[in-house]
Image: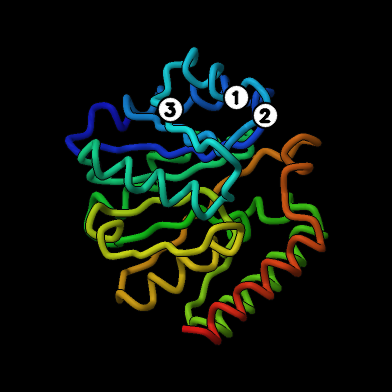
Amino acid sequence: MIKNNSNRVVIIIPAYNEQETIFNVIVKAREMSDYVIVIDDGSKDNTKNIAKQAGAIVYSHFINLGLGATLATGLRAATKYQADIVVTMDADGQHQASDINRLISPIISKQADVVIGSRLIGEDKQQMPISRRAYNYLANFITYLLYLQKTSDSQSGLRAFSADAVRKMEIKSQRMEVSSEFFKEIKKNNLCLKEIPIKPIYTDYSMSKGQSFFTGVKTFLRLILNRLTE
């Protein structure tokens, strides 16, 4: 388990109106690390209080700023806790904390700077609903088109970064386009990327939390605009 590893692993969980799932997500994450940070992105429900009750370190945005801003807050917080490795995971219960050991292993062995938990490689890739799979393939294509960085799952929220990678990356996106922006930073900073297969848990709740078609279109348009204005 991570707790017995000499590397300090900080787990970041961005959350917005996740009172239904956040407690169990934190409990499982705390089995893997003593440093679990929840960034409450202006939730209107009881997410913040439940996260504190579950034992997480909680940072709060006064208003909803978006996923990109929330992850940026989390990365800055992780450096304050002197993280050797930073892990991001979603608050909706889709990710299994038990995958984290495999996720960080290539970083510990110096084989990678960034590791993505991919839902689209390995024997479980067919479990992703067809509509989500099509959206992700399109997102992967656009990410490559814009940044020339290949990935099988650009939209995965389960990621691991070395402390050096965190220091080098500059996250500027406010919202969902941050998922692709990570690959821009990986390419720009010549970071070594690896992907490992993970087994996500799809529920009606986690499916309701994903991007809609129209949100996806807006995300892609913002990515293109950002690329053109660099």
Can residue 150 be seen here? The reply is yes
Residue type of the residue flagged with mark 2? Lys
Q: In this image, 131 relative to 211: left or right?
A: right
Q: Position of residue 38 (x, y in %)?
A: 46, 32
Q: Could you tell me which secondary element the residue under label 3 belongs to?
A: strand
Residue at left offset 67%, top offset 29%: 44
Q: In this image, 77 relative to 67: left or right?
A: left
Can residue 153 be seen here? The reply is no
Residues tagged 1 and 3 counted as in contact (Cβ below 8 A) = no
Circle 2 residues within 10 Å: few <14, some 14–19, many ≥20: some
Q: Is residue 110 above or below residue 74?
A: below
Q: Residue furthest front?
A: 62
Q: CA distance from mark 2 to mark 3?
A: 15 Å
Q: In this image, 42 relative to 32: left or right?
A: right
In front of the other: 83 or 42: 42
Q: How many marks?
A: 3
Q: Which residue is mark 3?
A: 58
Q: Position of residue 111 (x, y in %)?
A: 27, 61
Q: Which residue is mark 2?
A: 44
Q: CA distance from mark 2 to mark 1?
A: 8 Å
Residue at left offset 63%, top offset 54%: 123
Residue type of the residue flagged with mark 3? Val
Residue type of the residue flagged with mark 1? Thr
Q: Nearer the viewer, mark 2 or mark 1?
A: 2
Residue 79: which disc?
A: none
